[in-house]
Amino acid sequence: MRTLSSTQTGHAMIVLVFLTLLNILNFADRFLMQGFAIDMIHDLHLSNLEFTLLTGFVFTTFYTLMGLFMGALADRVHRPRLIAIGIFSWSALTAATGLATNFAQLGLVRMFTGVGEATLTPAALGLLGDKFESQQRAFAAGFYYLGAPIGIGSAFIIAGTLGAAIGWRNCFFTLGALGMVLTALLFLLGEPRNEQAKPDTAVQRPVSAVFAEILQTLRASPALCLLILGGVLVIFAQGAFVLDQLWLVQERHLDRQYAQQLAGMMFIAGGVLGALLGGYLADRLQARRAGGRLWFLALIYLIGVPIGYVYRLLDSSGTTFYICMFIGSMMITIGYGPLFASLQDLVPRQLSSTMTGFMILCMTLFGTSLGNLAVGWLADVFRAAAYSTPITKAVMLSMTPWLLAIPCFVIAARMMERENV
């Protein structure tokens, strides 16, 4: 097991912080549409299903398919430069979102935004896997995924503050310009593979071999297959939260601007705590037993998911509502570190970015995208049937797969324990 010097540790932390900042921008760009859900649905005359198509299927289909090839490419090329190309592309397209006037135009922009954003996470997690020791990987992945709560929270806060002052279109222009400026800093990052005495054999292999590599890796590890399935089920349930702004305003009767700011603060506070706590505790449990990170996921979801159901039934005037909302924000991010660190443990090092891209494809295409579609369709069905709280019923039904993820993690953990006996 390698040990990093203090200089290497310091450099690794600088890289981790910078990549996390880029991930914050990534999630802020991606979720700004949800922050402006009410405004954009009104201005562009969108139905609930059309809006969830834009935030889910249209974006995630191209994001995940390209993410697979970008992951394979990241195992072969200079990763910081690949990230730079992606950030410039998605930032320019984020700015172009402010020009859209209808569903078709917005769908086209969102589709190509997904292509640009697909470059970041497979390459970034591969870089972090090279920079950090194995026993610190859940911490590093969890810290990197602070980008999710901070970015999502920032998107809602921007919508509730800056959006009220300059409008939703100008917010997209501003965020896109910021990303294009940050692109230049990526050319200061080195490629760790260039510092190795022997080049990875994967670098010599053609990108066309990606499907054979993935299939071979999956066949060799049933635990990896269960990990990915569990991740898909978790993210499907989280995809049901896409209509939360409408739910807070229409069914919990909160003021629109207050709902935006509240969601932003909860995502940042609860999400940051969840990401850090998840990475730290999962690493601690992994040090005690093989498969510890997976045992952590099973236990934390067994405790946390029922609270999510209770939250949907509470009146928004009570303190318990806000406590459950905070815990729910923690549950969204607490699994990212353990999930992706477990992936790094189960795949060959030279295929880490490829398999990260594949896992993101599965989680986003079959998780987020289908979860978004399910809750949007169910909400419209329940509204047409004259239910008084159609979004509440749609979300609670769409959250069911989260419970099914628990046995996936338990069985995968047991497999890892048997392999290490």
Image (cartoon, rainbow, N blue to C red):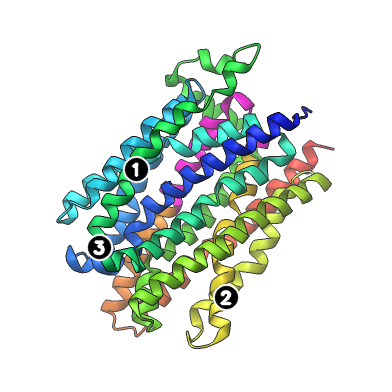
Q: Measure how far apart labels 3 and 1 are at the Cα level.
A: 26 Å
Eye-nearest disc, 3 or 2: 3
Q: Quadrant of the C terminus?
A: top right
Around disc 3, counting alpha carbons within 10 Å, would you say few (fewer than 14), some (14 to 19), or many (20 or more)?
few
191 with respect to 41 (left or right): right
x, y percent for residue 196: 64, 16
Q: Residue furthest left?
A: 101
Mark 3 / mark 2, whichever is N-terminal: 3
Instruction: Name which residue type carries label 3.
Output: Ile
Q: Quadrant of the N terminus?
A: top right
Asked if disc 3 and disc 2 are in contact, CB closer than 8 Å, the reply is: no
233 with respect to 286 (left or right): left
Q: Is residue 142 above or below residue 271?
A: above
Q: Measure how far apart labels 2 and 1 are at the Cα level.
A: 32 Å
- Determine the image quadrant of residue 386: bottom left
Q: Main secondary structure of the magenta part?
A: helix
Q: Measure how far apart labels 3 and 2 are at the Cα level.
A: 33 Å
Mark 2 / mark 1, whichever is N-terminal: 1
Q: Nearer the viewer, residue 205 or 152?
A: 152
Residue span colored magenta: 344-367
Around disc 1, counting alpha carbons within 10 Å, would you say few (fewer than 14), some (14 to 19), or many (20 or more)?
many
Instruction: Name which residue type carries label 2.
Output: Cys
209 with respect to 282 (left or right): left
Looking at the image, which residue is at 40% across and 53% down? 28
**352 drawn magenta:** yes
Q: Which residue is mark 1?
A: 114
x, y percent for residue 129: 63, 33
Looking at the image, which residue is at 56% across and 57% down? 333
Q: Is residue 314 above or below residue 25?
A: below
Could you tell me which secondary element the residue under label 3 belongs to?
A: helix
x, y percent for residue 110: 28, 47
Q: Is residue 310 above or below residue 405?
A: below
